[in-house]
Amino acid sequence: METMFEVIGRMLSNNKFSAIKEMLCEMNDVDIASMMAEMEPEDQVRIFRLLPKTSSADIFSYLDSDIQGNIVDAITNSELKFLMEDMFLDDAVDFLEEVPANVVTRVLAHTNSETRNLINKFLQYPENSAGSIMTIEMVSFPQNYTVKQAIEQIRKNALDKETIYTCYCTDGKRKLVGTIPLRRLIVSKEDALVKDIMYDDDQLIFVNTMDDQEEVAQIAKKYDLLSIPVVDKEDRLVGIITIDDIVDVIEEENTEDFEKMALLLPSEDNYMKTGVFSLFKNRIVWLLILMVSATFTGQIIENFEDKLAMIVGLTASIPMLMDTGGNCGNQVSTLVIRGLALGDIRPKDYLIVLWKEIRVALLCGLTLATVNYGRMWIIKLVTHNTVETNTFFVVCLAMMCAVIVAKAIGCTLPIVAKLIHIDPALMAGPMITTIVDAVTLLIYFSFATLFINMNLISG
Amino acid sequence: METMFEVIGRMLSNNKFSAIKEMLCEMNDVDIASMMAEMEPEDQVRIFRLLPKTSSADIFSYLDSDIQGNIVDAITNSELKFLMEDMFLDDAVDFLEEVPANVVTRVLAHTNSETRNLINKFLQYPENSAGSIMTIEMVSFPQNYTVKQAIEQIRKNALDKETIYTCYCTDGKRKLVGTIPLRRLIVSKEDALVKDIMYDDDQLIFVNTMDDQEEVAQIAKKYDLLSIPVVDKEDRLVGIITIDDIVDVIEEENTEDFEKMALLLPSEDNYMKTGVFSLFKNRIVWLLILMVSATFTGQIIENFEDKLAMIVGLTASIPMLMDTGGNCGNQVSTLVIRGLALGDIRPKDYLIVLWKEIRVALLCGLTLATVNYGRMWIIKLVTHNTVETNTFFVVCLAMMCAVIVAKAIGCTLPIVAKLIHIDPALMAGPMITTIVDAVTLLIYFSFATLFINMNLISG
């Protein structure tokens, strides 16, 4: 079956504009935006001009910034003015943050002065702050309104507001004093006073403009909120953050954690849109740091090289020991990093975590060492190699110790990072592996030296 | 300052029950639940009995299943009956899925037969299906209602419904035919017909009871929905999924990805609640598989052991080459896995991704090899070691190739996994590292052999 995109493409080339207009009226905004993303730049502009006036600003907000820039370049000043007036302020700010400076200048020149001042104020909030993601299109009224007055106000403004489902109550000084869900208003008596039925005091949840967006998301998740009010330093209500933006923040923060855990510098764009050089730049820093750190591991081997050369079977186990140590450390650090991010683990739980990990490490270490002993025996039987069976003990003992040390390091570093205000996500697999590698080899060679000194293996 | 928990604890031991009751009325449900989690079992029950009747079921839903079980054990049959009648069905099902069988039997015995049948039906939906997370407490009405009738119905039922902000319209056969936001009803004329103003056809978004919860979350995110209707095989409306549950699904799926990427079997409970043996069980399977896979790497080294022993400086570079290869692979696979999960990368983009990665790998490889060459020179100067400078070339050439191969494998495996319906998240760091290690060593030793055969290094 043909896709909508193909059908509309053919209609466009046949100039069937009014039919397209009818179709667009029936389609979902998000689907229209996805479809436009697949089109040629000139078709994007043509479709944009055919959009129903009531939803063109919404659809524009869903487009990627390069398409937005392309459309703004092509439309007239009066079309631009209409678009800016119709867009929600937070969407307008998002859009202006992404497009080139000359586009911003032209857009601001065709915005009324009130909106322009608001936009400029928004652009000044630090990136990732509550202020930078909030919207000002909320319903608020004085706490001494009656239910009837409140519902009247909502009915009048419903279409211009981003959500009407939670309303905000203020005192004479515009200070936030309570919230009230529309559902509660609807079931209350018409002459009841808002201040008598609103949620206030301990039940009032809000954030500050300068709070980090991650904190905002945590609060929204914890309290199952559809929107959170934002106040300024004087506790005055200045905006709200809605759940759809919070869902975006949650995914953004998760992506950042995934990236940090692979020791990538976080990138703003999605993978397909990121250039080769940016990808390179985001990766090379940590690759270089880790490579140079491996010098230490190299030196450990170098110091032991003579003995490695003399004892058959020691070198062959190096990769297995290193990998197993790294994998063990990686498993723990991932659980602890995620636990810290979700608030399931708190730094004060450290000793409980460590004690748990040591017991898990004993179980894992014993199992791995036992299986490994069998594995080495089987290889010896199959390949008839000349590895002494006492060497098996060296490898298995080193394995046990490496697992315990790896688990201990894997749970310690993320918690320490949290305590000294470094992002725990950096203490994931790659970082742990580099540290655990060096420690594992030190343990391995110490055991080997011990066995040689006790004449248990020849070297 | 004392915490609320400490104050209430002291009030409890002084039997100041009515004062506690007053306090609880003023507190947020979620905060009460968090506070109860810190208390001794008997205090949890005492607090539960003091809760305002209107919110006790809500607060119960926020408690962890062990506390829920503890409370149910302690309360009377009539208290239990009241609790079950007041709880939203999806919360009741969540609770019953977690508690021991004897508790389930007692609870179901004190539930009316209608609810019991519904609960039994819900318990049969497969885990992680849309059916298992939906709720039936939604507002729906026939499409031929007037706006006035619809609002009347909402007003009557508002308190028993999980959300009233999106309403669902059905035809004579209970088939879902449209949705209408409360906001649209409020601004419409009273005598307008619902079917004329509802969203239908292409604008109607819904899921099936058997759809995976991850798909549901994707759709909710894409369309910024506050709730999604769920239909059965005959397209009849059977429930809705609300945004707060979708946020939980998003976090759950992210946690699962984090766990899979560290090759942990996914666990249901949070870290602090998981026992040592479960943690061991979740980790050991993959640790064993990876350890045994490392046999292959060990064999590669063993076959080359004589030459390693003869050429100074070769062994010492093994960890650095392995780590760098692993890190490079890990970076790419993380980006690709995340891109696939968010829908930014599609399997059909494979060639674009691969070509991008090869160019990034060339840049990374060149930089790493150059810095490494310098690093080896400095070590030679400082430690006066006897490594031949031609050996530097072997290491740096192997490094270049390893980086390219690692990046290629790192982007290929997750996409292949996706195509053959294995979870791409499994193709992360640890898995890639094990494969890349073997390949890196093969490349390394091939170059060394080549140089020896050409008499460029002595061996």
Image (tube, coloured by chain):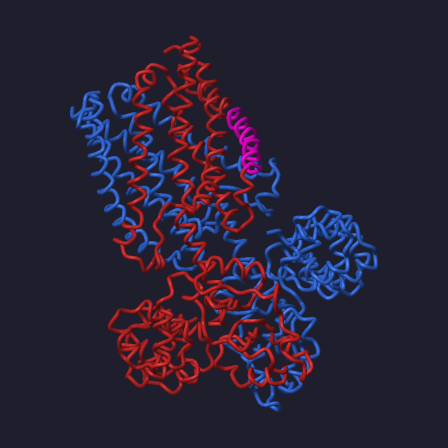
Chain colours: A red, B blue
Residue B5, how many percent across, how many down?
A: 66, 52
In terms of secondary structure, what is the magenta stretch mainly?
Answer: helix
Measuring from the top left, give residue B22's x and y in whole percent: 72, 63
Image position of A391 (left or right of B444):
right
Residue B178 visible: no
Q: How many marks?
A: 0
- Rendered view: A405 above or below B238: above
Apparent side of residue A111 relative to residue A169 in the rendered image (left or right)? left
Task: Report whether B10 appears left or right of B457.
Answer: right
Q: Quadrant of residue A81?
A: bottom left
Please name whichever residue, A108 or B189, is drawn nearer the observer in this view of the structure: A108
Residue found 49% across the figure and 57% down from its top? A215
Is B259 covered by the magenta stretch? no
**Quadrant hosting residue A205:** bottom right
Where are the magenta residues, as a range? A351-371
**How far across and how far down the image is residue B375, in percent?**
22, 33
Residue A157 in sight in this render: yes
